[in-house]
Image (spheres, rainbow, N blue to C red):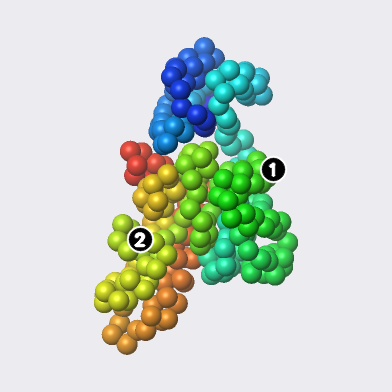
Amino acid sequence: MKKTIIGITIVGKDREGIVASFTNFVFQQKGNVEKVNQNVIKELFGMYLEISFTKKINIKKFENELQKVAKKNKMDVSTHHEINSQKNIAIFVTKELHCLKVILDSKRAVKGKISVIVGTEKSLSSMIKKSKIPFVLINEKDQSKAEAKLLDVCKKYNIDLIVLARYMKILTPNFVWRYPNRIINIHPSLLPAFPGALAYAQAFERGTKIVGVTAHYVTENLDQGPIIFQDSFNVNPEDSLESIKKKGQKLEADTLLKAVKMHLTNKLEVHWRKVHIK
């Protein structure tokens, strides 16, 4: 019989006995823990459990019982299991359009549904309107309030994958831990070199002969998540900063799209913080 795989994310205030409470619950339900990852940052506890069942399981009943355990432990718990082949995608943007445009232009080739686009400002709203995809503006300056709204949007659209298409906000562990290996970012550098928003300027000032981009899964460690794909291009002596940025932005969009396509066809697997292509 085919295994049923369920991902469980647990986030809340750190306290003793949380791990045991949830793993014991899984065992009581005749489930097997296949993956476990936990962390604590500033008294915030986060854990991801990937569990499997070889027997037929009533998922709704399982989730109801799980929420009782969550309530008892005062934790925020959610589950993820893909029952449909088509995944729901949320794209987060700020003001740069190159990555978003390439994804929208290629949406027929993407094995998934772009369910919503979330922006921090209205500069891309006219282009998004033409796509007929719902657009949600979240411009809260307070990051905790912004992330609360982001979570509401992702729950509303039952999001499986989040794509950061040059989204210029840093997501906190409280958000990231809820979507383990389900948030893809594109960075304008061959990480870990030249981190930050001014990567192209740094590369230009240092006389870099090769400039690259990195698509990676997002973790609580800024720009340090598992690397999915990297690509690069040569810098010619006659290249200006603007020409480098133009080349780089095209490569960003193409590499991000490639990573998204591979994720959506279940060809990527993260093991020991490294991405393996199946």
Residue behind mark 1: 156
Quarter of the image where one finds residue 34: top left
Residue 111 position, x and y percent, is 58, 52
* Residue at the limit of the structure toward the bottom, as seen here: 238
Residue 153 position, x and y percent, is 66, 46
Badge 2 crowding class, 10 Å Cα cut-off, few under 14, some 14 to 19, many 20 or more, is some
Labelled disc at residue 195: 2
Residue 24 position, x and y percent, is 47, 14
Point 65% across, 21% down: residue: 64
Label 2 or label 1, whichever lies nearer to me, is 2
Pick the residue in front: 152 or 79: 152
Badge 1 crowding class, 10 Å Cα cut-off, few under 14, some 14 to 19, many 20 or more, is few
Is residue 57 visible in the rendered image? The answer is no
Point 61% across, 60% down: residue: 120
Relative to residue 157, is residue 7 depicted above or below? Answer: above
- Whether pointer 2 and pointer 1 mark residues with C-beta atoms closer than 8 Å, the reply is no
Kind of residue sitting beneath label 2: Pro
Is residue 43 visible in the rendered image? The answer is yes
Kind of residue sitting beneath label 1: Lys
As helix, strand or loop, the secondary structure at mark 2 comes to: loop
Point 54% across, 20% down: residue: 73
Q: Is residue 128 left or right of residue 40?
A: right
Relative to residue 30, is residue 184 depicted above or below? Answer: below
Chain-order first, disc 2 or disc 1: 1
